[in-house]
Amino acid sequence: MTTATLTSPSPLSPLHSLADPEGGALDGLVDLARYPLDRPGSSGWHDLVDEGRRSLMMHGSLSLDRFLTPEALDATMREIAAIAEHVEIRQQTSSVYSRRTIEDDLAPGDPRGVQLTWNAGHVTRDMIPPYSPAHRLYVSPAFKAFIAAVVGKECVFEYADPLAGLVATVLPPGGRYPWHYDTNEYVVTLMLQQPEEGGEFEYHQDLRSPGDENLAGLGAVLSGSASTPARTIRSAPGDLQLFLGRYSLHQVTEVAGSKDRHVLVLSYAERPGVIGPVDRTRAVYGRVTEVHLLAESARFADNDGLIL
């Protein structure tokens, strides 16, 4: 009779860990030799944070190449690709704010009301299992502490929104994200699958600022007459990007070829309990939940004077 040998589960095994905001070890998920997120307070950790802050100040973005381990990248790519097969690719038109209730009251010619065409799908948070590398990374205290340090916050919080916070964007051939602003100050993305052509991330850094929508600058970009060209960020699968998208207008150009573009998006807030507005959530994801409907009655304005 042979004796079975028990082996420890892989760090990526569903038996090893669920998404856990009380623990959330990054072993097997992040290349910790290059990015020592597991050693907060160490010289390597501080060097990484300082580098990130300088990059955000100069460029409005931070790129960390080969952030995920090859095993985590492969697992996440496969998992998101499988879920993406069940995602509806929706074509719609909206302004850079995706806020129909605001757009309806604008005068003709106002750049805030210019309608742009989107063609994309979304794997929402409620579709991503809690044992996935993506979900485990999103809730990890060590990861959130690193992001908070880079953006200069005491701490950051996961979204309470059941659809947003952790999503994967799906751009098929012909798909694109036109010019838009994000609702939160910054967003973290991980490239999972590149298209054969197109799908370039372009942005105009700090086109608007707290209290100033800069409608002249917005109109110039939308009409193709901007005085300065857009910047481009090129990412490879496994690369992390932190981008200040609330103030920098940005887009993803049309995808071409036969492959989809898949990007994991991890969004955090400065306060707990953030839930997206009903009109924007419906416009972006095509549906809302009871949580969104209940939260709408308690909606309060953001304090920076900009459209959410």
Image: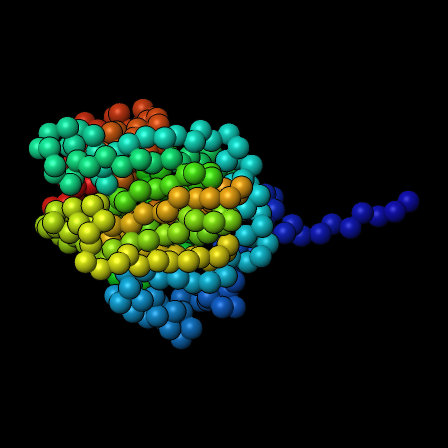
Residue 15, x across and y down, in percent: 60, 44
Residue 145 picture quarter: bottom left
- The residue lying toward the viewer, choosing from 160 and 52, is 52
Q: Can you name the residue that lies furthest to the bottom here?
A: 43
Report the label total. 0
- The residue lying toward the viewer, choosing from 204 and 57, is 204
Residue 249, x across and y down, in percent: 25, 50
Q: Can you name the residue that lies furthest to the right here?
A: 1
Write the residue at 57% across / 43% down.
78
- The residue lying toward the viewer, choosing from 276 and 241, is 241
Give left or right: position of 165 versus 128. left
Give left or right: position of 87 versus 308. right
- The residue lying toward the viewer, choosing from 69 and 154, is 69
Give left or right: position of 4 versus 264. right
Residue 158, x across and y down, in percent: 34, 45
Write the residue at 35% across / 70% down.
51
Query: Which quadrant: the C terminus?
Result: top left
Is residue 272 something that shows in the picture?
no
Write the residue at 39% across / 44% down.
254
Residue 297 vertical placement versus 222 (above, below): above
Residue 154, x across and y down, in percent: 27, 58
Is residue 101 something that shows in the picture?
yes
Residue 220 vertical placement versus 111 (above, below): below
Query: Which quadrant: the N terminus?
Result: top right
**Colouring method of the image:** rainbow
Residue 144 picture quarter: bottom left
Write the residue at 39% across / 62% down.
63
